[in-house]
Image: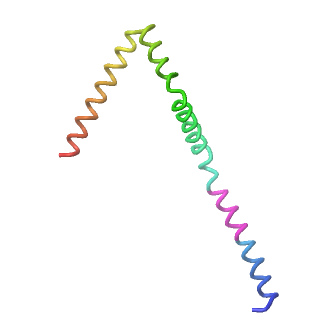
Amino acid sequence: MNRDELLLRQQVLLARGRQLRLKLALETEALKSPLARVDGVQRGLAWLYRHPLVPLGAVVAVVLWRPSIAIRFGASALSAWQTYQRLQRLLRS
């Protein structure tokens, strides 16, 4: 291949690369919103991991101000946990 053919080939490949990048951007446009939500959840969880006393304080506040709600939620959580444990045992056997 001479120099002109190589330059032409290079230009064709560069144009093809631009075309593929544009196609990829258009095809992934639908994923932007769900991925942005996932990023937000990850940032929120990271914040909670850095500030573990905030959810603990919220739980204590609910227990002190509305003990009946805390008891109801605790009972529901215990029931859900027991159901989960039973399902795990069933799936293992």
Q: In the image, residue 8 lies at what x, y percent?
A: 79, 82
- Tell me if residue 6 comes above or below residue 30 in the rendering: below
- Tell me if residue 82 comes above or below residue 66 in the rendering: below
Boundaries of the magenta span: 17-27
| Labels in figure, total | 0
Name the foreground residue: 79 vs 42.
Answer: 42
Q: In the image, residue 41 lies at what x, y percent?
A: 55, 36
- What residue sits 49% from the left and 17% below the top? 57
Q: Is residue 25 magenta?
A: yes
Q: In the image, residue 80 lies at what x, y percent?
A: 31, 28
Q: Main secondary structure of the magenta part?
A: helix
Looking at the picture, the colour scheme in use is rainbow
- What residue sits 54% from the left and 27% below the top? 51
- What residue sits 39% from the left and 15% below the top? 70
Q: Quadrant of the N terminus?
A: bottom right
* Residue 3 quadrant: bottom right
Horizontal relation, residue 35 to residue 69: left or right: right
* Residue 90 quadrant: top left
Horizontal relation, residue 6 to residue 31: left or right: right
Q: In the image, residue 9 lies at what x, y percent?
A: 75, 82
- What residue sits 75% from the left and 77% below the top? 12
* Residue 43 quadrant: top right
Horizontal relation, residue 91 to residue 31: left or right: left
